[in-house]
Amino acid sequence: MTKKFQIISPSTGDVFAERPYADNEAIRKALDHSLHAFEEWKMTRIAKRAEICTNAVDYFRQNAKAWGMEITMQMGRPIRYSPKEITGGFAERAGYMIGCADKALSRITLPEKKGFSRFIKKEPLGTVFVLAPWNYPYLTAVNAVIPALMAGNTVILKHSEQTALCAERFIEAFQHAGLPDGVFQYLHLNHDQAAEIIAKGKIAHVAFTGSVEGGRAVQQAAADRFLTSTLELGGKDPAYVTSDANIPQTAENLADGSFFNSGQSCCGVERIYVHKQVYNEFLEAFLSAARSYKLGDPADPETTLGPMVRKENAERADRVIRQAVEQGAEALIRLDDYPELGYPFLAPQVLVNVNHDMEVMREEIFAPVAGVMSVESDEEAIRMMNDSPYGLTASVWTEDPEKAVFIGDKVETGTWFMNRCDYLDPALAWTGIKNSGRGCSLSILGYNYLTRPKSYHIKHKQS
């Protein structure tokens, strides 16, 4: 009997959908089909690939309202935001990567050398195995899917069980756009099946987005193979509010960076360091912004904060908060500030009197929780920001661009922001250091991880 899994809607606790896992024969056929389709797809003109991918993105836009509701029901994000994942960031990233593909994939011609022609081509790898998470189910998947296809690779997508329907929407869009059969496929898999494909399947590259533990599992599965991979893992992203920051705007933006999507973002802000001169002013404004969120049913257009994805995730976050309080932290959001809806609903929380001995300031919580610390100087802020095993994004809030760059040069991070946070610009390389990952996606540089160089050394005359 084929095993099945269920998608439990976090807002209702009901089964939203049920799907079977792929069996061994389906996996084998998908891998073989992908390999055969690659031979023709890699020879397809970039302009034709762009036409098909653009048509698929247009189809996503046309279905954003219905598919946005599916996001809400699968992982709990409020409906007022879910369609915008498709019409906003998804479409922006896809459009940029389609638009820059011709330049990114063009051959590199070397200076003339008498009697020789020399150039380097960027060739597709083969089948790219994309492992996508639930928290931004389309945004995270598109980072790999579209550029992999544009580079001439074939793709097999394994989406999180929590948002498995998103994989089915991808195939629907690509079929509508006329993508040749076998170039894009999805498989509903459990963790063991995914590891087996990485260890033994006919794939050339793994694009993984998820936890640090998941990244280690990918590396272990690939240990006996010479696969390439990109790993976009966790974050414990810091922000530094300098003495000259615009406090009202800073507080509003950092509240959004901390609490949007119930804090379930790899680049969400979890640590905030504030110069002592503006600490009290910032804290008052930040608390006001935090208390403005409306926690409730994500299907209600008035709701701005939905449930966390699973009960156990909310329980773990609550445990970390309580542990911090026991260690001396102070929780500034009172129980009566928000309705008691029970797990997986969790109100935003602001903690002060925190320190780096506390788990809440050391490990990724992935919840609407922010720790706020006062610092004496820029130097102390830099030291605290770097005191972390993660390095995905970090931000500084100041009116001085030169100061922002000076501080940024000293902060260990993949992306450095001034006066913004929790955002991904597709023209910039999306990358992390330390436990936040390896390699990069998006930008022209992202194509380097989805292709391999092939050198041509042509001698014109025999001597």
Image: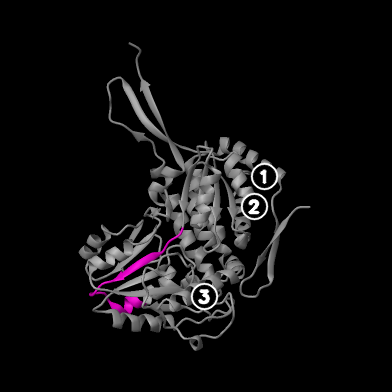
Q: Secondary structure at mark 3?
A: helix
Q: Are marks 2 and 3 in contact (CB under 8 Å)?
A: no
Question: What residue is drawn where x is 37% and y is 68%?
Answer: 356
Instruction: Give how far across and how far down residue 44 sits, in percent.
Output: 52, 39
Magenta region includes residue 241: yes
Question: What residue is drawn where x is 58% and y is 82%?
Answer: 341
Amino acid at the residue labelled 1: Ile
Which region is colored magenta? 234-251
* Earlier-in-chain disc, 2 versus 3: 2
Other-residue count near label 1 (Cα within 10 Å), few / some / many at <14 / 14–19 / ≥20: many
Q: Which residue lies under the disc numbered 2?
A: 189
Amino acid at the residue labelled 2: Leu
Nearer to us in this view, 331 or 444: 331
Q: Which residue lies under the disc numbered 3?
A: 318
Looking at the image, what colour scheme do you see?
A: one colour
Nearer to us in this view, 345 or 185: 345
Label disc, if present, on residue 337 of the rendered structure: none
* Earlier-in-chain disc, 3 versus 1: 1
* Earlier-in-chain disc, 1 versus 2: 1
Tell me: 3 left or right of 171. right
Magenta region includes residue 16: no
Q: Which residue lies under the disc numbered 1?
A: 27
Instruction: Examine the rendered structure and indicate whether residue 109 appears above or below residue 181.
Output: above
Tell me: 114 left or right of 78. left
Nearer to us in this view, 392 or 138: 392
Other-residue count near label 3 (Cα within 10 Å), few / some / many at <14 / 14–19 / ≥20: some
Other-residue count near label 2 (Cα within 10 Å), few / some / many at <14 / 14–19 / ≥20: many
